[in-house]
Amino acid sequence: SQQGEEDPQALSIQEGENATMNCSYKTSINNLQWYRQNSGRGLVHLILIRSNEREKHSGRLRVTLDTSKKSSSLLITASRAADTASYFCATEDSSYKLIFGSGTRLLVRP
Amino acid sequence: GAGVSQTPSNKVTEKGKYVELRCDPISGHTALYWYRQSLGQGPEFLIYFQGTGAADDSGLPNDRFFAVRPEGSVSTLKIQRTERGDSAVYLCASSVSGSGPETQYFGPGTRLLVL
């Protein structure tokens, strides 16, 4: 079963614009991770934020976590055509397995 | 070093047949995970190995699914009496220890199609 929902399901932006994706989850977590997937294969880990952290940065990526609202957001700044992919949030509880959301399909138009 | 590899890349089989999907984790990684991803969905957890033993198999959908990791490295996911609903991409991931927050490294997946 899926842990939660990602919003929006699909996003189309112009190159250079920022892209924001949101993720909501249902249960208590140890950490939340964001992954990227191209062409339905090859999940690539982007960033991990622990439950006691509120914000984290990595290059053009900024992730926030609000455990009171059980939500997270991923911001990609100055997007590029190469950022076109599906983005998934995944929560990890004490069992160390990942529970994924349904994903946001991002299209960055050149 | 080499990442997680999975074979075959694609597998087409007929309903009722038996299939085996193989995963080679990153060398030295203790933890290994299997996930299944249907079209348009996020991956769903199937089973997690810590060394040779299955630490959590709560995601296996039914007793037609079984996975082994006899030497604590390569793992095989076995599906008996395949059904059309088993069609999906089967993803394998490994991590260093499986304890504490750490990155799971995913393989490219095996796309299974049951006709």
Image (spheres, coloured by chain):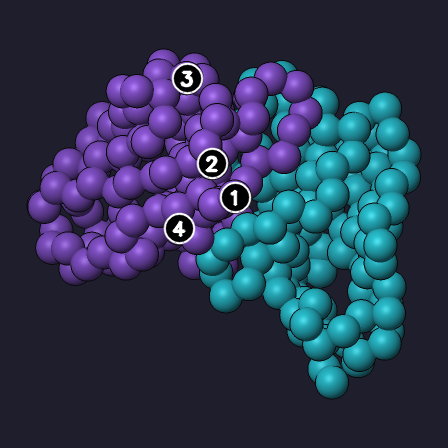
Instruction: Identify residue type, mark 4.
Output: Gly
Q: Which of marks 4 and 2 is nearer the N terminus?
A: 2
The reply to the same-chain question for discs 1 and 3 is yes
Marks 4 and 2: CB-CB under 8 Å?
no
Q: Spatial distance from mark 4 to mark 2, Cα to Cα?
A: 14 Å
Q: In this view, does A8 lie to the left or right of B40?
A: right
Q: What element carries label 3?
A: loop
Amino acid type, mark 2 = Ile
Q: Relative to residue A92, is residue B89 depicted above or below?
A: below
Instruction: Give neighbour class at mark 4: few <14, some 14-19, many 20+ (Cα, 10 Å).
Output: many
Helix, strand or loop at disc 1? Answer: loop
Which tint was used for chain B?
purple
Return the x and y of residue B13 as percentages of the image width and height.
15, 55
Pinpoint the chain carrying mark 4.
B
Q: Mark 1 highlights which residue?
A: B1
Q: Nearer the viewer, residue B45 or B11?
A: B11
Mark 1 and mark 3: Cα distance apart in space: 20 Å
Distance, label 2 to label 1, CA atoms, is 8 Å
Q: Are marks 3 and 4 in contact (CB under 8 Å)?
A: no
Q: In the rendered structure, are the residues bearing label 2 and label 1 in contact, judged by CB atoms less than 8 Å apart? A: yes
The residue labelled by disc 2 is B26
Rate crowding at label 1 as few (under 14), some (14 to 19) or many (20 or more) other CA atoms within 10 Å.
Answer: few
Residue B62, picture quadrant: top left
Q: Which of marks 3 and 4 is nearer the N terminus?
A: 3
Task: Tell me how far mark 2 sits from mark 3, CA to CA.
Answer: 13 Å
